[in-house]
Amino acid sequence: MSGEDATPEAAEGEAAPLRTDLRPIVEAVREADAAAFVAVGDRFDDDLRYLTRFSGPDRPYALVVSPDGESADRVGRAVCCAPALFREQAEREFVAAARDPAADSADDADSGPTGDADGEFHDGIAREVRTDRVGDHAGERAAAVVDDLTDGSDTDDPTVLAPASIPHDAAVYLERAGVDLASTDAVAAARERKTPAEVDRLRRVQRATVAGLARAEAVLAESEVVGAGDDEREADDRSGDGRRPPLRWDDEPLTTERLRREVNRVLTTRGVRDAGNTVIGAGPSAADLHYVGDDPIRPGETVLLDVSPRGPDGYYGDATRTFVVRGDGGWERRAYVAVEAAREAALDEVEPGVPAKTVHGEAAAELAAYGFDPNAAEGEAGFTHGTGHGVGVSLHEGPSLSGAGELRPGHVVTVEPGVYDPEIGGIRLEDLIVVTDDGYEILAEYPFGIVPEKRSDAR
């Protein structure tokens, strides 16, 4: 269901504005009969990056969200306690970017520097930036804002919701200020279902991801077997561990690190960064799910490429393919056929309302039918991980295809069955999909095949 039902792409070079709807956070506060919601972190905190769309600060800052009971036209208020040097950027990314483009220009003119005019923001939650008390800890600043927004109405230990990941020191400062903290999963739940603008970002970075795969496949296709066509005895010469000599490319031995650099170079030209997530294993290291070391790439052995770059707006791509140069059609061929079949079985189950576990169960059952252990433990031979996970501003987020809950439109997940043998290698095939109203869309198609080819988009 990945063709004509796909969401239309934005015109190249254009992108819809990224805006986070804070209403689910306000609703969580009201349902818990709490005073406010608080998040504390820096630009490396994915929850805070998602909530504020503020990408700048490399030091702690805070966000406070509170219901607004005094205005019929406004759902709530949100205050970003930004570092003083980042005020202009926070005004631009947190406040201005959240304004309703349909708002009357006269309202814009009257909104003032903090932009708190009723009804001006896309979700009805007025946003402002505060840079006072910059010498205080972000937790202290957040506590002061909570007191201000609630007008001290909950003077005796007001309850404030926070993500479970709130830094310990911030929690201590909030509690010292008389705040009673309660954990909430409202942010994680909101992040699971992507907006069209978020899907657009994911699609863009996924295009760069598959371009990286194409470059790696081209290098493998161009590589040469030592002595091939000249002296077969040399080609069959074995190293001390019984493995064949490494492939050669560009007159040098080909290694996983050389191949990784080629992939990362393409990612850079496409405007994304590898973020240390270009996983390439060869032979036994292809059974290591997160191998980023340097191994020789040899003929007849699996080469697993898992590419997961991050785009300029913080969203990740994720795709995996596996190749073998000059294979003998043994274990790796049987494993590849099994993983292809598992991938198709998993995708056949994807549609709204289907329990996420069903997708994993079908993939595991298909691998078992081919004779592979579908419940192998880490380090054992077989299928050692779940079939997929959510992708967004974190590389791994909800929903999990091995977890509870049902698939919903807007869920963006990987589908990545694989089988591994620590003594031989590994096979994994992975695509990134978005669940649509009647099925799914693969965000960037890339061909399959265990024998590497040089494709037109490999540059």
Image (cartoon, rainbow, N blue to C red):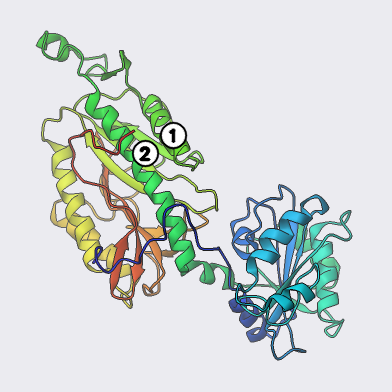
Image marks 2 and 1: residues in contact by CB distance under 8 Å: yes
Q: Which of 170 and 25 is in front in this view?
A: 25
Residue 209 sits above or below residue 90 on the image: above
- Is residue 249 left or right of 263 when viewed as pictured? left
Residue 149 sits above or below residue 423 on the image: below
Q: Is mark 1 on a helix, strand or loop?
A: helix
**Residue depicted at 36% across the width and 25% down the height:** 295
Mark number, residue 440: none
Q: Is residue 288 visible?
A: no
For the residue carrying disc 1, how many other residues have a C-alpha within 10 Å: few (<14), some (14-19), or many (20+)? many
Give the percent coordinates (x, y) of residue 358. 28, 69
Residue 255 sits above or below residue 134 on the image: above
Q: Can residue 96 be seen in this view?
A: yes
Please name the residue that numbered disc 1 is placed on: 264
Mark number, residue 212: 2
- Dividing the picture into quadrants, the one containing residue 128 is bottom right
- Is residue 273 left or right of 407 when viewed as pictured? right
Q: What element carries label 2?
A: helix
Q: Nearer the viewer, residue 290 or 422?
A: 290
Q: Quadrant of the N terminus?
A: bottom left
